[in-house]
Amino acid sequence: MNCKERIRALREDNDYNQTKIAQLLNIGQRTYCDYELGKTRIPIDSIIILAKFYDVDLNYITGVSNIKNPFPTK
């Protein structure tokens, strides 16, 4: 899975709609939809917000790893 597939799967697994996640990121629903479709590249700060929100590490959310580790804490 790549990043766009992973963020969609995480959203659907947690029963959130695109509008809810777009509000979390302070963007429009259409922009978030474009992230999931791969039409627009997701900014790294948004990826970090999503990783924290879903409590998964960046390797998982970006598709580098299939192991769902929790977001690291300091």
Image: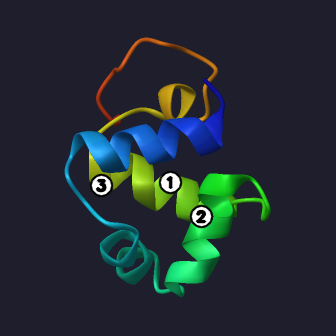
Q: Is 66 placed left or right of 55 in the picture?
A: right
Label 3 sits on residue: 53
Q: Which mark is residue 11?
A: none
Quarter-wise, where is residue 18 in the image? bottom left
Label 1 sits on residue: 48
Q: Position of residue 68 (x, y in %)?
A: 35, 20
Label 2 sits on residue: 45
Confirm or deny contact between disc 1 and disc 2 (CB under 8 A).
yes
- Disc 3 crowd rating (10 Å Cα; few below 14, some 14-19, many 20+) is few
Q: In the rendered view, tell whether residue 68 sits above or below residue 55.
A: above
Kindly report the distance in space between the C-alpha atoms of the residues bearing marks 3 and 2.
12 Å
Residue type beneath disc 2? Asp
Position of the N terminus by quadrant: top right
Which mark is first along the chain, 3 or 1?
A: 1
Kindly report the distance in space between the C-alpha atoms of the residues bearing marks 1 and 2.
5 Å
Position of the C terminus by quadrant: top left
